[in-house]
Structures are given as structure tokens and as C-alpha cells.
Image (tube, rainbow, N blue to C red):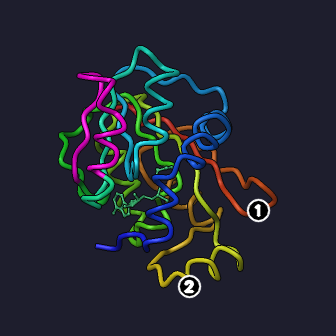
Amino acid sequence: MPVMPTLERVFCRSAPWGVFAGRVVLPWALAGAALEGRVLEIGSGGGTMAAQLLTTHPGITLTAVDPDPAMVVASARRLASFGDRVSVRKGDATGLPFADGTFDAVVSFLMLHHVVAWEKALAEAARVLRPDGLLIGYDLLDTGPARSFHRAEGAQVRLATVDGLRRVVGALPFRTPEVRRRLGGYAVTFSAYRAGP
Ligand SMILES: C[S@@+](CC[C@H](N)C(=O)[O-])C[C@H]1O[C@@H](n2cnc3c(N)ncnc32)[C@H](O)[C@@H]1O
């Protein structure tokens, strides 16, 4: 199971990332999409995005899943004040411990590249979404700087291309997929709705 190197794990739980991710990155990644009902965040890290989602979407309940025990502890602590609106558990996005059609939305922020078999994570997102449920998120693209950064860290990652993501999402039971190159080609945003039964 690939887990992030120490530098990224510390950064992911840091206060500056918390503020920037919540105030700037989350609205950019959601691009106005309304989340409702039962939301699953895969690769939830220190719970930064989850905290902001719960604050800005008072109608949702959120399940946060991450395979790294340190992240689970950190996010459980960060999200404790949301009470029974949130549940944090250890889990792998490539084999989610939930029944088919459990969630109204699945969100994936900056985590797919850490999932080497990210096709499986997207397939699992499709499986646990109800018909018409929304998959939405963003990630880094396969670029020289992203490769160098992760190589320097000794991280095991597999960065996606826009075409690769489009191919994979397009082959899964989703409708109206949107996969967009962003930030000068360094990042990608994606969204799609689960096709009907
Ligand atoms: C860069 S952090 C992003 C955390 C959070 N989404 C955020 O935006 O702050 C990537 C996270 O993906 C998690 N991760 C790595 N492999 C995973 C997998 N197979 N399934 C779910 N999460 C995974 C890591 O443990 C880490 O917490």
C-alpha cells in the first residue's frame, strides 16, 4: 500500500494547507457543483477538505476514508466537532468497504496520483455511487515538475494524463464526464454522473 512520504504527510496536515485548501482550492475544484446527501471523500488525508465541505454544505453527511492510520487519527481529531455528520475510517479507494449505490457524491482531491491503480479507485467510486450520483475532484497531471517532486521525495505515484483520465472515466458507467486541463496543464479537474441502473 503506497503511503505518502513524510514531507507531504506533514504538509497535508498543516495549518497553511488547511486555510489555502479550504478557502481557495475547494471552491475551485467544486466549480459551483452542489453536493448533497451522503458524501464520500476518498484519500481524505488530514481532513482539511472534509472540514470545509461540512462547513459550507450544512445538509451533507460525510464519510472520510484514507489508508494511512496517521491521517485517520488526524482527520478524526480535526472533524470531531461535526459530531454524527461525519465518519472517518481506514480504507483503500481501490477496495471500498461500502455496498453498491451507497453515496450521493464521491469527492477525490489530490489523491488519485498516490493510488497507483487509480483506474480501480475510479471504478470503485462508480460502484458506490447511486444512479445520478456525482463524482468530482482534481489532481496533478503527469508533468516534469510533478514527476521530479515525487521522485525527489521517493514517493510511489502514478500521475495521470488528461487523455488517460478521459479514457478511463469514459469506459466506466458514468454520463456527461468532464475532464479539464487546468492551471497551465499542471492539474486536472474532473466530474461525471453515475449512469442509471
Ligand atoms: C496529497 S494527500 C490529499 C489529502 C486530502 N484529499 C487533501 O486534499 O488535503 C493524498 C492522500 O491520499 C491517500 N491515499 C494514498 N493511497 C490511497 C488509496 N489507495 N486509497 C485512498 N487514499 C489513498 C494518502 O494517504 C493521503 O492522505
Quarter holding residue 145: bottom right
- Secondary structure under badge 1? helix
Mark nearer the N terminus (2 vs 1): 2
Quadrant, the N terminus:
bottom left
Amino acid at dot 1: Gly
The residue sitting at 65% across, 73% down in the picture is: 146
Residue annotated with mark 2: 151
Classified by dominant secondary structure, the portion drawn in magenta counts as helix
Cβ at disc 2 under 8 Å from ligand 1: no
Instruction: Please identify, in this view, whether the residue under mark 2 or under mark 1 is nearer the observer.
Output: 2
Which residue: 44% across, 63% down? Answer: 9
Which residue is at the far top? 59
Q: Which quadrant of the frame does ligand 1 lie within?
A: bottom left
Q: Nearer the viewer, residue 56 or 163?
A: 56
- Magenta span covers which residues? 72-90
User: Mark number for residue 157?
Assistant: none
Q: Amino acid at mark 2?
A: Arg
Q: Is residue 36 above or below residue 50?
A: above
Choose between 77 and 22: the one closer to the eye. 77
Q: Left or right? Give the position of 63 relative to 29.
A: left
Residue 26: horizontal and vertical position, in percent? Answer: 60, 37
Give coordinates of residue 44: x percent, y percent: 39, 48
Q: Residue 181 versus residue 77: which sits nearer the camera?
A: 77
Residue 185, numbered label: 1
